Amino acid sequence: MSLSVTVVPTKPFKDQKPGTSGLRKKVPEFQQQHYTENFIQAVLDGGLSDRKNGAVLVVGGDGRFLCMEAANVIIKLAAANGVSRLIVGQNAFFSTPAVSALIRKGFEGRQIDGGIILTASHNPGGPRGDFGIKFNCDNGGPAPDGVTNRIYEITTKISEYRIVNDLQCDFTQIGRYEFNVEGRNFVVDVVDPVEDYVKLMQQIFDFDKIRQLLSGKLTGSRFKVLLDSMHGATGPYVSTILCDHLGAASEDMLRTVPKPDFGNGHPDPNLTYAKALVDRSKQGDHDFGAAFDGDGDRNMILGRNGFFVTPSDSLAVIADNIEAIPYFRNRRVSGFARSMPTAGAVDLVAKAKGMEIFETPTGWKYFGNLMDAGRMCLCGEESFGTGSDHIREKDGVWAMLAWLQILAERQTSVQNLVQMHWKKYGRNVFTRYDYENVDGSGANLLMNFMEAQMPAFIGRELSANNVKYTVASADNFQYKDPIDGSVATKQGLRFLFTDGSRFVFRLSGTGSAGATIRLYVDSYIPPGDSGRLFMDSQDLLKPLILVALDLSKMEQFTGRKAPTVIT
Ligand code: VG1
Ligand code: CO
């Protein structure tokens, strides 16, 4: 039977501009008539352009509420738009890193033109929670600004979309499904979402050695690992890798069943939302802990007794020990990169190793070009993102395995590894204050007020708690991509001080309601300053935080006395 295409008239929605990482809105907004269809049509046209006809795409998401419905819409629109084949994870499920890996690997010898990822990442899910749609390009990475702008342009002018209403594909069962759409062949391959990703990890890491670390064969005592998947996408990957392959205890793998509402949780692996893991870790029974976000690209690393590794330090420690990872032993190690608000610990490692270091705007999409050009192989963000050029997304499970591999090689504790790092390079103390869901106009006023003041502050002395800081420079961060020359402006207000400390203000681009102001603060303690090297980060940064809050008039503009999340 041949299925026919229906052309449906529609009108633009004004709010379909992708943010830091795709389009994110509350579920009811995506449920409006034509809303999801409009955006998918724009993604197919803007994301694929002249490659749309005959294109091969990967589709899947983190299992949150609406993933199945959205996958259905994608299948029906793709069929009507001349796409030749979709590779869909069983139950429309894939972690974000697994999608990136599959796009890069190809499918049965065919090249893949991109992917559509259904996730709002670390944002809560459920019928009143968040949903999101993101387009990734044929390199496996999030679409760069040029592409998302093109998609957005189309959403502002769209007048119709194409759909095959009668096409029903049961993507709960693995297999190949073929359809005839007005004489053309359209194929949906429903695949196991876990298998290929696990194989990739086996190629990157030495599983035998990690297994020996965990069992105690390596050091004489067992090494206990506690992981929290927060009911997000990593669950099935973690169970397979840690329990089936590495011999970890399944009772130490928490919340591994993906749930549409993340069990009513907030799947963001930080000290606030992954508190359950932190508390368990503090009981002292485990040598290592890690948590992951909704779509599996973020990670938080803990040592014994809840010892917290900041993402900035995690990146630097991995960089310093990069040759412990077999993948990097077999290839040329190119440069490192971090997002601008991430503390500069990795810069010091790059310098010591004589490697290039790049400072990019917030968002993984800015790393892709550097990796594709072979200039950079390891990067991270302070927002619990760490990854390498094995794919083009940050990768939570990869980061956890990188740590285990390094610990197997170095045979020491997490805390000792980090503290030895500080003794060698000094410590980049970092904290982030998030003011979530504040009134949008107040947030904009705060940013405008500060930007206007910036020039006047340069050279001025600011103080709090009897500590003085002199402003060396202040600007709104701008980045010119060294590969394609594209420029990203207004990426965060930076105040840099003469002693190397700094703070940064940014508005979040991933929220779905109101505005979120992020304040990033960091300071450098040299290795010789043994009095302060191991002090509590909040104590160390207190004066600088007070300066930042005072300067920005945070309370006046937002009415908030305290942040919602402190990292
Ligand atoms: C946040 C983080 C950023 C990260 C982005 C996507 O963006 O700060 O570092 O790349 O989320 O992460 P923003 O604009 O809200 O600060 V994920 O795991 O949500 O895809
Ligand atoms: Co994420």
Image (cartoon, rainbow, N blue to C red):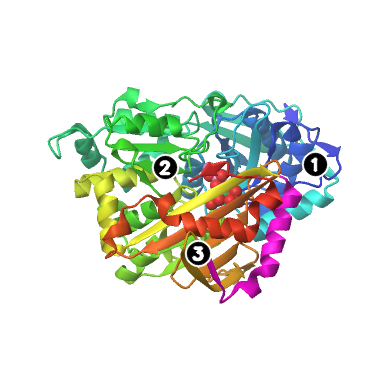
Q: Nearer the viewer, residue 153 or 535?
A: 535
Ligand 1 near label 3 (Cβ, under 8 Å)?
no
Mark 2: few/some/many CA within 10 Å (<14, 14-19, 20+): many
Q: Which residues are magenta?
A: 439-463
Q: Position of residue 361 (x, y in %)?
A: 56, 61
Q: Name which residue type carries label 3.
A: Arg
- Tell us which disc is closer to us: 2 or 3: 3
Q: Name which residue type carries label 2.
A: Met
Q: Callout 2: helix, strand or loop?
A: strand
Q: Which residue is mark 2?
A: 300
Q: Nearer the viewer, residue 497 or 518?
A: 497
Q: Which residue is mark 1?
A: 161
Q: Position of residue 522 (x, y in %)?
A: 46, 59
Q: Which residue is mark 3?
A: 502
Q: Please check the rendered image and state whether residue 46 is part of the magenta-colored stretch, yes or no.
A: no
Q: Name which residue type carries label 1.
A: Tyr
Task: List the single residue furthest toward the bottom.
Answer: 459
Q: Earlier in the sequence, mark 2 or mark 3?
A: 2
Q: Nearer the viewer, residue 237 or 344?
A: 344
Main SS class of the magenta portion in the image: helix
> Does 143 sit above or below residue 62?
below
Q: Callout 1: helix, strand or loop?
A: strand
Name the side, left or right, on which 424 lies relative to 137: left
Q: Is residue 551 visible?
A: yes
Q: Residue at x 65, y 36 (%)?
A: 131
Mark 3: few/some/many CA within 10 Å (<14, 14-19, 20+): many
Q: CA distance from mark 2 to mark 3?
A: 23 Å
Q: CA distance from mark 1 to mark 3?
A: 48 Å
Q: Are marks 1 and 3 in contact (CB under 8 Å)?
A: no
Residue 225 — which label? none
